[in-house]
Image (cartoon, rainbow, N blue to C red):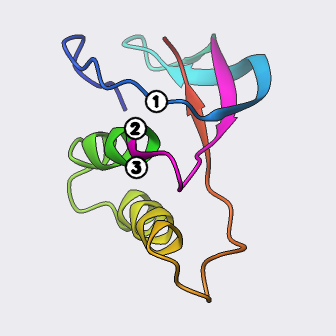
Amino acid sequence: MKIACNSNTPFGAKLIRDKVNVGRYGNDGRYHDFESNFVEIQPECDNDVEALKNAVKYWENDKFGMNACYVVQAAKNGSKYYVNHKVYALTAQ
């Protein structure tokens, strides 16, 4: 997924590990190493919640992204069921 370059939503996710190489599908039909960061989304941080909601807009009809956003929002709102759930993401900036 690529988010538009004009997306300047700040977020303060907790850095778990930086410089993680993941395979990124290229126009040539092959995967290439791509450097990213592995982060934990912080439900108590408004910017993290907004950044995730913004990213979900680019995942049309994708249940995984929508569910991650739901879990983060439920944890933020104090849902006892989701309070111990964690949401992780890969990000490149």
Residue at left offset 28%, top offset 17% = 8
Image height of 35 relative to 2, above or below: above
**Residue 36 belongs to the span the image colors magenta:** yes
Residue 86 location in percent, x, y? 68, 61
Whether label 1 touches label 2, CB < 8 Å: yes
Between disc 1 and disc 2, whose residue precedes? Answer: 1
Question: What's the residue type where badge 2 is placed?
Answer: Asn
Whether label 2 touches label 3, CB < 8 Å: yes
Give the label on residue 47, or none: 2
Q: Which of 59 and 89 is in front in this view?
A: 89
Residue 51 location in percent, x, y? 36, 38
Residue with the most extreme bottom position? 81
Q: Specify the segment rendered in magenta.
A: 35-46
Residue at left offset 44%, top offset 15% = 26
Give the label on residue 49, or none: 3
Res 4 → quadrant: top left
- Is the residue marked by circle 2 packed among few (<14), some (14-19), or many (20+) residues within 10 Å? some
Residue 70 location in percent, x, y? 40, 70
Q: Nearer the viewer, residue 19 or 27?
A: 19
Between disc 1 and disc 3, whose residue precedes? Answer: 1
Tell whether 49 sits left or right of 83.
left
Question: What's the residue type where badge 3 is placed?
Answer: Val
Give the alpha-carbon distance from disc 1 to disc 3, as whole Å.
8 Å
Tell whether 6 sits left or right of 59.
left
Identify the residue position indicated by label 1 in the image: 11
Q: Which structural element holds mark 3?
A: helix
- Is the residue marked by circle 1 packed among few (<14), some (14-19), or many (20+) residues within 10 Å? some
Give the label on residue 61, or none: none
Question: What's the residue type where badge 1 is placed?
Answer: Phe
Residue at left offset 49%, top offset 70% = 71
